[in-house]
Protein backbone atom coordinates (compact mmCIF):
# COMPACT_ATOMS: atom_id res chain seq x y z
CA UNK A 1 0.00 0.00 0.00
CA UNK A 2 1.27 3.47 -0.79
CA UNK A 3 -0.05 6.93 -0.03
CA UNK A 4 1.00 10.54 0.40
CA UNK A 5 0.10 12.56 3.46
CA UNK A 6 0.49 15.85 5.26
CA UNK A 7 -0.70 16.53 8.80
CA UNK A 8 -2.93 13.46 9.06
CA UNK A 9 -2.14 12.66 12.68
CA UNK A 10 -5.81 12.62 13.62
CA UNK A 11 -6.57 9.65 11.32
CA UNK A 12 -3.21 8.10 10.45
CA UNK A 13 -2.87 5.61 13.30
CA UNK A 14 -6.39 4.29 12.79
CA UNK A 15 -5.74 3.95 9.06
CA UNK A 16 -2.48 2.05 9.57
CA UNK A 17 -4.00 -0.30 12.16
CA UNK A 18 -7.05 -0.94 9.99
CA UNK A 19 -4.98 -1.89 6.95
CA UNK A 20 -2.52 -3.92 9.01
CA UNK A 21 -5.48 -5.93 10.39
CA UNK A 22 -6.54 -6.61 6.80
CA UNK A 23 -3.14 -8.08 6.01
CA UNK A 24 -1.17 -5.13 4.67
CA UNK A 25 2.29 -5.84 6.05
CA UNK A 26 4.16 -2.81 4.72
CA UNK A 27 3.19 0.71 3.69
CA UNK A 28 5.09 3.25 1.60
CA UNK A 29 4.31 6.80 2.75
CA UNK A 30 5.40 10.08 1.22
CA UNK A 31 5.13 12.79 3.87
CA UNK A 32 4.74 16.24 2.37
CA UNK A 33 6.02 18.22 5.35
CA UNK A 34 3.81 17.21 8.26
CA UNK A 35 4.14 19.32 11.40
CA UNK A 36 1.65 17.52 13.66
CA UNK A 37 1.78 14.12 15.39
CA UNK A 38 2.02 12.47 11.96
CA UNK A 39 5.81 12.69 12.23
CA UNK A 40 5.88 10.70 15.50
CA UNK A 41 3.40 8.10 14.28
CA UNK A 42 5.40 7.52 11.10
CA UNK A 43 8.61 7.21 13.11
CA UNK A 44 7.12 4.53 15.38
CA UNK A 45 5.81 2.46 12.49
CA UNK A 46 9.04 2.84 10.55
CA UNK A 47 11.09 1.72 13.59
CA UNK A 48 8.84 -1.34 13.82
CA UNK A 49 9.59 -2.13 10.16
CA UNK A 50 5.96 -1.68 9.11
CA UNK A 51 6.42 1.24 6.74
CA UNK A 52 8.89 3.20 4.67
CA UNK A 53 8.78 6.99 4.84
CA UNK A 54 9.80 9.23 1.97
CA UNK A 55 10.17 12.76 3.22
CA UNK A 56 9.33 15.35 0.57
CA UNK A 57 8.45 18.56 2.44
CA UNK A 58 9.06 20.93 -0.46
CA UNK A 59 7.42 18.95 -3.25
CA UNK A 60 4.63 20.58 -5.22
CA UNK A 61 2.21 17.69 -5.77
CA UNK A 62 0.34 19.62 -8.42
CA UNK A 63 3.44 19.32 -10.58
CA UNK A 64 5.12 16.14 -9.34
CA UNK A 65 2.35 14.12 -7.71
CA UNK A 66 1.94 11.54 -10.45
CA UNK A 67 5.68 10.88 -10.57
CA UNK A 68 5.81 10.31 -6.81
CA UNK A 69 2.77 8.04 -6.82
CA UNK A 70 4.49 5.95 -9.50
CA UNK A 71 7.69 5.83 -7.44
CA UNK A 72 5.80 4.74 -4.33
CA UNK A 73 4.03 2.02 -6.33
CA UNK A 74 7.40 0.77 -7.59
CA UNK A 75 8.77 0.67 -4.04
CA UNK A 76 5.69 -1.20 -2.84
CA UNK A 77 5.94 -3.72 -5.69
CA UNK A 78 9.61 -4.32 -4.91
CA UNK A 79 8.77 -4.89 -1.23
CA UNK A 80 6.04 -7.37 -2.19
CA UNK A 81 8.37 -9.29 -4.48
CA UNK A 82 11.06 -9.47 -1.79
CA UNK A 83 8.49 -10.54 0.80
CA UNK A 84 7.05 -13.26 -1.42
CA UNK A 85 10.51 -14.47 -2.41
CA UNK A 86 11.50 -14.77 1.24
CA UNK A 87 8.22 -16.50 2.03
CA UNK A 88 8.65 -18.92 -0.89
CA UNK A 89 12.21 -19.70 0.20
CA UNK A 90 11.04 -20.36 3.75
CA UNK A 91 8.23 -22.60 2.47
CA UNK A 92 10.66 -24.50 0.24
CA UNK A 93 13.04 -24.99 3.16
CA UNK A 94 10.23 -26.20 5.40
CA UNK A 95 9.04 -28.66 2.75
CA UNK A 96 12.60 -29.89 2.31
CA UNK A 97 12.97 -30.43 6.05
CA UNK A 98 9.68 -32.29 6.42
CA UNK A 99 10.22 -34.47 3.37
CA UNK A 100 13.70 -35.51 4.49
CA UNK A 101 15.45 -34.09 1.44
Image: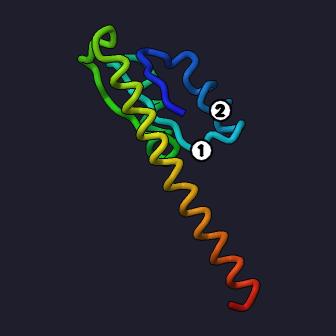
Q: Secondary structure at mark 2?
A: helix
Return the residue nearer the eye: 96 or 55. 96
Q: Is residue 28 left or right of residue 101?
A: left
- Above or below, 55 against 85 in this view is above
Q: Residue at the bottom extreme?
A: 100
Evaluate if marks 1 and 2 touch, with contact meaning CB atoms under 8 Å apart.
no
Residue 19: mark in rendering: 2
Q: Does 69 sit left or right of 18 as displayed? A: left
* Relative depth, front residue between 84 and 23: 84
Q: Which mark is residue 36?
A: none
Answer with the quarter of the image where residue 7 lies. Answer: top left
- Direction top: furthest residue: 62
Q: Position of residue 17 (x, y in %)?
A: 64, 33
Q: Is the residue 86 above or below the residue 98 in the image? A: above
Labels 1 and 2: the sequence-earlier one? 2
Q: Is residue 60 left or right of residue 27?
A: left
- The percent position of residue 85, horizontal first and vertical second, equals 54, 61
Q: Residue at x 39, y 35 (%)?
A: 53
Whole-percent x, y for residue 36 in the image: 41, 17
Q: Position of residue 1 (x, y in %)?
A: 54, 33
State the CA–CA distance, disc 1 to disc 2: 8 Å
| Residue that badge 1 annotates | 25
Q: Quadrant of residue 19?
A: top right
Residue, x 54% and y 55% (percent of image)?
A: 83
**Within 10 angstroms of label 1, few (less than 14), some, or many (20 or more) residues?**
some
The image quadrant of residue 55 is: top left
Residue, far left: 58
Residue occupying image coordinates x 68% and y 90%: 101
Q: Residue at x 71, y 36 (%)?
A: 22
Amino acid sequence: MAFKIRDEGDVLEHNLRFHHALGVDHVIVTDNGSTDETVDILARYQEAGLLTVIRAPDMDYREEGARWMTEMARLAATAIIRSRSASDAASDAARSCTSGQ
